[in-house]
Amino acid sequence: MPLNRRKFLKKSAATGAGAAIAGATAAPAAEAAPVARPARHMKRYSLTVMGTTDLHGHVFNWDYFKDAEYADKAGNAMGLARISTLVDRVREEKGHCNTLLLDAGDTIQGTPLTYYYAKVDPITAKGGPVHPMARAMNAIGYDAAALGNHEFNYGIETLRKFEDQLDFPLLGANAVDAKTLRPAFPPYFMKKFHVPGAPPVKVAVLGLTNPGIAIWDKAHVQGKLAFEGLEEQAAKWVPRLKSLGADVVVVSAHSGTSGTSSYGDQVPYVENAAANVARQVPGIDAILVGHAHVEIPELKVTNERTGRTVVLSEPLCYAERLTLFDIELVFSKGKWEVESVSASLRDSNTVADDPKITKLLKDEHAKVVAYVNQVVGRATETLTTVEARYKDAPIIDLITKVQEDVVKTALSGTPYASLPVIAQASPFSRTSEIPAGDVTIRDLSSLYVYDNTLVAKLLTGAQLRAYLEYSAEYYVRTAADAAVDVEKLTNAGGRPDYNYDYVSGLSYDIDIAQPAGSRIKNPTFKGAALDDAQQFVLAVNNYRANGGGAFPHVASAKELWSESTEIRTRIAEWVTAKSVLDPKDFASVDWQLTRNGTPVF
């Protein structure tokens, strides 16, 4: 099916949504039931827009990796079943016909549940199942959702099937067909809210997604889709929505507020651009923010051209929070005007699961629980990531060993077969553990929580040295005589754990007493000093290979091989084939932290 012809792109002359724009139109405008509002001197109307973001496949308050109810130190609860209860309460408080429910993206990746219905029992199979996230979101009654970058992780076919299963549109004004540059998804959604004795209030929702998709999921989207800047596309579409009669404009943006990017200068667009959109583009009343996985109850940004306040809010990820935008309108001089906007959050830990959702998806949940608890091997000792951020941990060596073996096999018989293969891996989790004894898919999945795939890149010793220096910026500079607090030693400059890399096959010290850029000491390969001219094959995940984290050289390096099988699956296959998980088969001490040549630990 052509990318720009989807069910929610179809034009209906009866919707009142306006003429087709740039080859795409809005979803049919939904009619809300009338509600009486007390009128004093003028007509008023109160609208509540609810929002979630970064659900990442969390339907229930359940941790598939621990096979138990989810719990954290902050007492959070998660899952769409909790959100459903919160939404019902808000609809009861405000009147169902005075509410709108949105999502800001990253829906179908992130848990064994979403993996299962993408790969094990895929929704794309003939006669395949309906995706659990589609069933839950349809049942709750979402009105629209923005595309997230992780929507593309399983390929366009899976995304399109998920889209077809939804009762609401997936929005992405800046996701365009690579050839025609016309919208590949509905850019916006409009809904009318009727008010007795006054014209209806028209609400437009503009959906924007992340330009980083072009880098992170290049293998799936290159030559098919392009992703333009949020600021530019908002500037294009908001005036059109106003011309279509929108009284309220809400943006659902899968983009954070920081104004920063994790992919360097590889694309000319900002990754976390939501606040920029608020500042630069007139006519927006509220922005539902996503992507950054931070909690922002309310952020007020002043538009540089109009001086008006734009209200932003980002609910915590995994359905732990629900944003409420309370929008007050007044009918004056023949038109509706937004008088005020405020934002607040509702907490999922204050309610119980909605039994409607629990009953609806209990069978899917049970299938996934059974799947992740399959035993695939036996560990001779407990392996953990608890100290993996600052010590070379055997459990991370397992990842690099698997990646090395897969790439060596893939390059066998090629001109590159004689080159040394090394590998990168990151300490994704601080709590993952493979216990001694039976090893399950659940144990291995908790080690590698992302659906990354494997790529082989050609790099020189000099490029690897620069790569390691960049990675070492993760550590906070610590003087030789200063006390070492491991809780304050890492994440310098806010760098997340997944943007710190081990590199196997090389030996090196990281001197944290030195300034960033001068920390890699004594790099060697097989006992000899690292030769800057020597060529290596780096087994690297696709996120890093495509430029994620902005590591030097790797994105532009020659690609020798790649595959679509997840690294997590390769780890499970390796352990299954071995049947015994023994550190002597994969562990090695390749690096250590030092200060002026003295080991820190």
Image: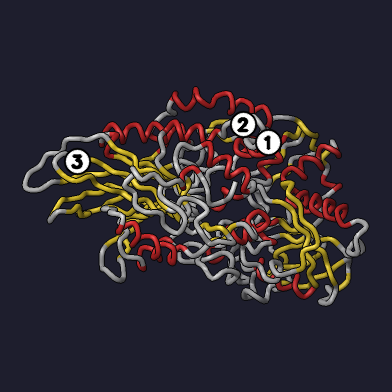
**What number is the disc on residue 575?**
none
**Where does the image place residue 410, in percent across and percent down from the top left?**
85, 53
Q: Is 551 on the left-hand or right-hand side of 307?
A: right
**Which residue is at 70% across, 71% downward?**
553
Q: Is residue 102 left or right of residue 382?
A: left
In terms of sequence position, does the residue under pointer 2 or pointer 3 come before the other? 2
Is label 1 in a helix, a strand or a loop? helix
Q: Is residue 597 shown above or below 351?
A: below
Residue at 81% x, 76% y: name it.
532
Counting from the top left corner in percent of width and height, residue 300 is at 31, 60
Residue 53 visible in the picture: no
Mark 1 — residue?
442
- Which kind of residue does numbered mark 3 sit on? Val
**Label disc, if present, on residue 195 of the rendered structure:** 3
Q: Which residue is mark 2?
A: 67
Q: Residue at x 72, y 45 (%)?
A: 568
Q: Quadrant of residue 531?
A: bottom right
Splitting the image into 4 quarters, where does residue 557 fall?
A: bottom right
| Along the line of sight, the residue nearer the viewer: 50 or 32 | 32
Q: Residues within 10 Å of mark 2 (few under 14, many from 20)?
A: some
Real-space Cα separation, disc 1 to disc 2, in angstroms:
8 Å
Residue 104: % across, % down: 45, 49
Residue closest to the far front: 13
The crowd level at tag 3 (other Cα within 10 Å; few <14, some 14-19, many 20+) is some
287 or 446, which lies in front?
A: 287
Q: Quadrant of residue 518?
A: bottom right
Task: Report x, y in % for residue 89.
Answer: 32, 32
> Looking at the image, is mark 1 or mark 2 earlier in the sequence?
2
